[in-house]
Amino acid sequence: MLALSEYFAEPPHIEWFGDRPFAFSRLSREYAERLEKAAIAKEDDIKALPVSPGWETVAEINPTTARFSRYSAFLIMPVTLPLFFAIRETYWHLLEALDQKPAGRFIQCWFNIHRSGQSLPRHHHVYPFIGTFSAHAEGGETRYGNSKQESDSDAIMPHTNGQLVITTGPNHYHNTSPWTDAERPRVTYAFDIVEAENWNTRQFFLPFDFA
């Protein structure tokens, strides 16, 4: 396996949008394509799992997302190991920007596969940090904002293949644009970084950071 630094096409950096910091880095396109293919290869296996509570109404158009609590991408695909450590490296830069020290936290990670016309609806996560990795998502974008409805003040993030983004989670609403490529699906990996007290047996949380 390559050293972690060799997976980075662009090292982590911070950009602020309003009152929210975003940590960005970019991994190589070759590695992003490997993660794209790995997710598609596992899609049918994930669709056979029970739907996560609360996602029943959108499970048909968000099949792998709607089962996010039933699996960890890190446990079923060895190719995701560099992604795990790239997330942690990028997350540490975000902590520094927030003047926070490392703390005992866990991570859950799943993948989203969207075909032409499909998208993720506006929603938010209750956990302190959220993020996404674009395996194949160029041509799409994600909107982030502080309100339930789209707003002119939203931060709009165009996707670049290999791009990793981490930001703060509570009341940070986001949604994706509909995917338009009929030949090749949109594939992203999403994750939550959660406090130790959020750990439970109903979701796949893995140790991530240590105080």
Image: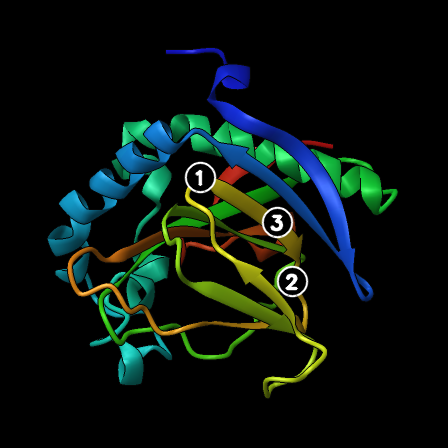
Relative to 29, residue 146 above or below? below
Quarter of the image where one finds residue 16: bottom right
Query: Residue 169: which disc?
Result: 2
Residue 188 percent across, percent down from the top left: 37, 52
Question: Closer to the observer: label 1 or label 3?
Answer: 1
Question: Mark 3 sits on what residue?
Answer: 166
The residue lying toward the viewer, choosing from 175 and 102, is 175
Q: Residue furthest bottom?
A: 149
Q: Earlier in the sequence, mark 1 or mark 2?
A: 1
Q: Quadrant of residue 56?
A: bottom left
Badge 1 marks a residue whose secondary structure is loop
Q: What label does residue 162 carry, if any?
A: 1
Which residue appears at 22% of the width and 39% of the height?
Answer: 38
Left or right of 153? Residue 89 is left
Q: Is residue 41 visible?
A: yes
- Report crowding for label 3: few under 14, some 14 to 19, many 20 or more residues within 10 A (C-alpha): many
